[in-house]
Image (cartoon, grey):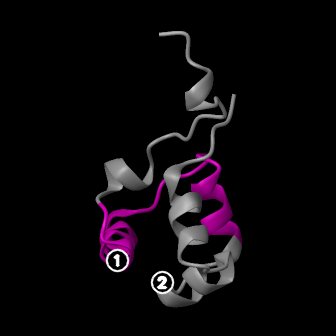
C-alpha cells in the first residue's frame, strides 16, 4: 500500500523539486520528503504557506494516494 500523500503529485505536476519547495518555505528538503511520505505533518505557520503555495487546503494536500489502478475496479 502506498502511503504517499497528494502533495508529491501536486509538486510533480508543477515540475518542482523537493528543494524548490524547501527554498520557498525556508525548510529542509528532508522535511518535504517526510511530508510526502506521510511521516510528518507541517506546523501551522508552514502549513498556511504550503496551502497558499499550492492553492489547496491541508486535507487535499495530505490525502493519501493509492497504488491501485482505478480502471481495475470490479464495481
Q: Earlier in the sequence, mark 2 or mark 1?
A: 2
Crowd around label 2: few <14 · some 14–19 · many ≥20 (10 Å): some
Which residue, given by chain and number where applicable, does mark 2 sit on?
25
Marks 2/1: CA distance? 7 Å
The image position of residue 40, as x and y in percent, is 56, 51
- Asked whether residue 51 is drawn in magenta, I would say yes
Q: Is residue 42 left or right of residue 13?
A: left
Q: Are marks 2 and 1 in contact (CB under 8 Å)?
A: yes
Instruction: Tell me the SS state at disc 2.
Output: helix
- Asked whether residue 42 is drawn in magenta, I would say yes
As drawn, the label of residue 28 is none
Which residue, given by chain and number where applicable, does mark 1 sit on?
49
The correct choice, above or below, for 52 with respect to 10 in the image is below
Residue that sits furthest to the top in the current view: 75
Kindly identify the residue that appears in the image at 62 percent across and 22 percent down: 72
**Placement of the N terminus among the 4 image quadrants:** top right
Instruction: Tell me the SS state at disc 1.
Output: helix
The correct choice, above or below, for 29 with respect to 7 in the image is below
Amino acid at each position: 500500500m502506498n502511503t504517499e500523500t497528494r502533495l508529491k503529485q501536486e509538486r510533480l505536476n508543477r515540475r518542482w523539486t523537493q528543494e524548490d519547495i524547501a527554498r520557498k518555505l525556508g525548510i529542509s528538503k528532508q522535511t518535504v520528503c517526510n511530508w510526502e511520505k506521510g511521516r510528518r505533518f507541517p506546523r501551522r505557520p508552514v502549513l498556511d504557506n504550503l496551502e497558499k503555495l499550492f492553492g489547496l487546503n491541508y486535507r487535499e494536500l495530505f490525502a493519501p494516494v493509492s497504488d491501485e489502478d482505478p480502471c481495475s475496479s470490479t464495481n
